[in-house]
Amino acid sequence: PPPPPPPPPPFLSLYFSLSLWSKTYGPVMTVYMGPRRAVVLVGYDTVKEALVDQADDFTGRGPVPVLVRATRGYGLVISNGERWRQLRRFTLTTLRDFGMGRKGMEEWIQEVSSQLIDRIQSTKAKPFDPTFFLSCSVSNVICCMVFGERFSYDDDQFLQLLQITADSIKFGSSPWGQWYNNFPGVMKWLPGGHHKAFADIDKMRSFVMSKIQAHRETLDPSSPRDYIDCFLNRISQEKDNPTTEFQEDNLVSTVMNLFLAGTETTSSTIKYALNVMVKYPKIQDAMQQEIDSVIGQKRSPRMEDRKSLPFTDAVLHEIQRFMDIVPMGVPHYALSDISFKGYTIPKDTIIFPLLHSVLKEENRWATPWSFNPQHFLDQNGNFKKNPAFLPFSAGKRACVGESLARMEIFLFMVSLLQTFTFSTSEGPDSIDLNPEYSSFANLPRTYLITATPR
């Protein structure tokens, strides 16, 4: 039999309620979200058993109505089967070829990071909102790989895209987004914020299509400049293959996937990290001392420095654990009946791997509800891994950009701490680390912070 259903969930902090219910109903639960049946997987052991040990059964991706409408059903994030396999393999290989997780990428991030530092210097130690500087910088890293270019902080079209990206994630986490996911047929006819959200996403689509057209006109098949060129090459190589997934709709939607995912999650994590620095000045000070003693304040950080900076590395891991950016995980889907832990999960069931329950699991973390870098340090102060650190999910559908995001968080934060000390005129106690928006994504609160040059 399928696992027992608890009462229908309230909309607020659903992931928190689900964790609590699992104490009564066990680690595999059925819940109803609107008319849709969903199964929720709770705790590290259960999530790992599904996504890693039974990976093939759980590779399906649910038809999330908001995502289906935004991507028209194409692209990497929402696809299944052969389409997903072809696009994921191609995307991982191509991003790696353009330096994801490698030296070339490191230099790009260092360059973008020095632009960010110049921008922050221009605030002259006056309070500023870091949101926009961070999203410009992080977005430019993914833009280098996908569009082969960086955009200026003053480029109006780029700024509009960043605004759409931020608004789209907020929409996905808003009651409108949740209602649309649960009742798409009805919501289509009702007025509300979802119409503007989808109109904005269509503007992003037009921008991406214009970039693809410009690439097509200047393409040199023998020396591809970026992801789009590589994809266009594959389209022409496979034009006679009837089962190919290399066609324009998949290119447009995958580029949108990469742009959205590569901008908002990483820039929100770094923004949250700055809030943590302001709230815990002693932690900030200890990181700066460690960075000064290993790298100094002049040289740019490199990824190989990470192993010599165990405390800094532990704090950055703890920031991601505590922030819990995608608490419900991106939903999976039963493409056929799945036999799991003695239950049958019927075909067409949405499956939520509750990452929140892994990152805050009481028997995996000494103080799950407190910010505590010691979670990632052994008694000698060396960095210590914890298998329950799964902010990027796990298994075959784990985040494609994980190595890029980890590189950005480390290099941006170390550069910022080499150059500035962050504070707020209201004092550390004014910072609330609880999320401002919370459902699909836990987004950090916005504060005016001061960056004092060191």
Image (tube, grey):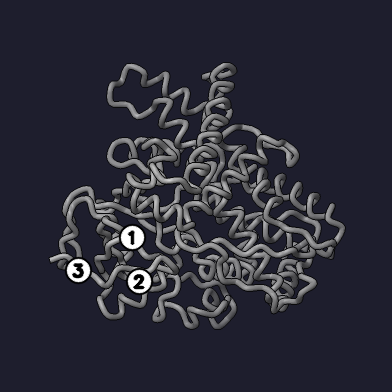
Estimate the spatial distance between the alpha carbons at disc 2 and disc 1, rounded to whole Å: 11 Å
Estimate the spatial distance between the alpha carbons at disc 3 and disc 2, rounded to whole Å: 14 Å
Q: Which numbered disc, 2 or 1, marks the residue closer to the eye?
A: 2
Q: Nearer the viewer, residue 438 or 286?
A: 438
Residue at the outermost right position: 124
Residue that carries the numbered disc 2 in the rendered image: 18
Residue that carries the numbered disc 3 in the rendered image: 3
Q: Amino acid at mark 1?
A: Phe
Q: Is residue 429 positioned above or below 181 on the image? A: below
Split into 4 quadrants, where in the image is the C terminus? bottom right
Instruction: Kindly identify which numbered label has been placed on residue 352.
Output: 1
Instruction: Kindly identify which numbered label has been placed on residue 77.
Output: none
Q: Position of residue 246 (x, y in %)?
A: 39, 27
- Which of marks 1 and 2 precedes in the sequence? 2
**Callout 2: 10 Å neighbours few (<14), some, many (20+)?**
many
Q: Amino acid at mark 3?
A: Pro
Q: Position of residue 55 (x, y in %)?
A: 28, 54
Q: Is residue 144 positioned above or below 346 on the image? A: above
Quadrant of res 175: bottom left
Q: Is residue 390 positioned above or below 162 on the image? A: below
Please tell me whether mark 2 sits on a helix, a strand or a loop.
helix
Q: Position of residue 124 (x, y in %)?
A: 87, 58
**Callout 1: 10 Å neighbours few (<14), some, many (20+)?**
many
Label pair 3/2, CB-CB below 8 angstroms? no
Quadrant of res 393: bottom left
Residue visible at 76% across and 74% down in the picture: 426
Label pair 2/1, CB-CB below 8 angstroms? yes
